[in-house]
Image (cartoon, helix red, strand yellow):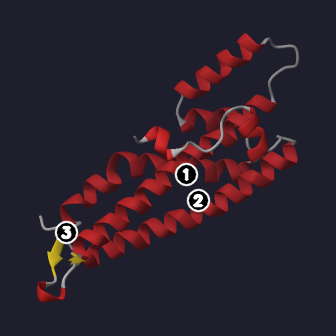
């Protein structure tokens, strides 16, 4: 598989179109999966907001550990969302599961074709757009419940600032 082709006497390299298209598809796919992982945190917020007052830190951490071991579908079921939002949440779970378990496997044999990659990119863009809408609706719902939003400053105070790539990847 040729990643780049040499540009003769002109110097430099030109990326192979099929490989660039495939790289873009994998990037879009990875972004969507990451967004589904982050989406779980909104459900954690709803569940944490509902915890009874008076629970010990150990009890609360036990709950969080359970959520961390769980799957998105279980979090959605436990969140007790309004009907329309619940329906869309279950569709999101189905979409996430399909993406994780079948989407790329079904398309992998054909990703050498730049035109096919464009079709796959369009499919992923539609999923991304629908996820945008769902994240907005879920955010509106969590704010209406009074679930606090954590600021970047609060994350920094907790020691959860953006990782330094020099520390992580060196």
Task: Mark 3 and mark 1 in contact? Answer it, CB < 8 Å.
Answer: no
| x and y percentages locating residue 168 in the rendered image | 46, 39
* Left or right: where 129 falls relative to 100: right
Give the residue at x 68% y 18%: 61
Spatial CA span between label 2 and label 1: 8 Å
Crowd rating for badge 1 (residues with CA inside 10 Å; few <14, some 14–19, many 20+): some
Q: Which residue is mark 2?
A: 131
Q: Whole-percent x and y of residue 89? A: 62, 49
Name the image quarter holding the N terminus. bottom left
Name the residue tied to disc 3.
112
How packed mark 2 is, by other alpha carbons closer than 10 Å (few <14, some 14-19, many 20 or more), is many
Work out whether residue 133 or residue 150 is closer to the camera in this orientation and state it.
150
- Distance from the alpha carbon under mark 2 to that under mark 3: 27 Å
User: Which residue is at a point 79% across and 54% down the rendered structure image?
Assistant: 140
Task: Answer with mark 2 or mark 1, whichever residue precedes in sequence.
Answer: 1
The relative height of residue 63 versus residue 106 in the rendered view (above or below) is: above
Q: Position of residue 106 (x, y in %)?
A: 26, 57
* 2 vs 1, front mark: 1
SS under mark 1: helix
Contact between marks 2 and 1 (CB within 8 A): the answer is yes
Left-right relation of 87 to 53:
left
Q: In front of the other: label 2 or label 3?
A: 3
Residue 150 seen in render: no
Label of residue 35 in the image: 1
Tag 2–tag 3 contact (CB < 8 Å):
no
Please report whichever mark, 3 or 1, sits nearer to the chain's N-terminal start.
Answer: 1
Alpha-carbon span between mark 3 and mark 1: 26 Å
Q: Is residue 100 above or below residue 80?
A: below
């Amino acid at each position: 598989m040729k990643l780049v082709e040499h540009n003769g006497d002109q110097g430099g390299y030109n990326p192979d179109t099929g490989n660039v298209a495939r790289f873009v598809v994998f990037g879009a796919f990875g972004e969507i999966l990451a967004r589904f992982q982050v989406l779980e945190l909104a459900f954690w917020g709803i569940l944490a907001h509902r915890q009874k007052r008076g629970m010990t830190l150990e009890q609360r951490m036990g709950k969080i550990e359970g959520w961390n071991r769980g799957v998105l579908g279980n979090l959605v079921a436990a969140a007790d969302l309004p009907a329309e939002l619940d329906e869309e949440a279950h569709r999101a779970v189905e979409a996430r599961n399909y993406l994780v378990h079948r989407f790329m496997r079904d398309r992998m044999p054909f990703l050498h074709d730049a035109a096919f990659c464009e079709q796959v990119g369009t499919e992923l863009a539609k999923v991304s757009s629908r996820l945008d809408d769902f994240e907005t609706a879920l955010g509106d719902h969590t704010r209406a419940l009074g679930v606090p939003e954590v600021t970047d400053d609060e994350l920094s105070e907790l020691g959860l600032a953006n990782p330094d790539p020099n520390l992580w990847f060196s």
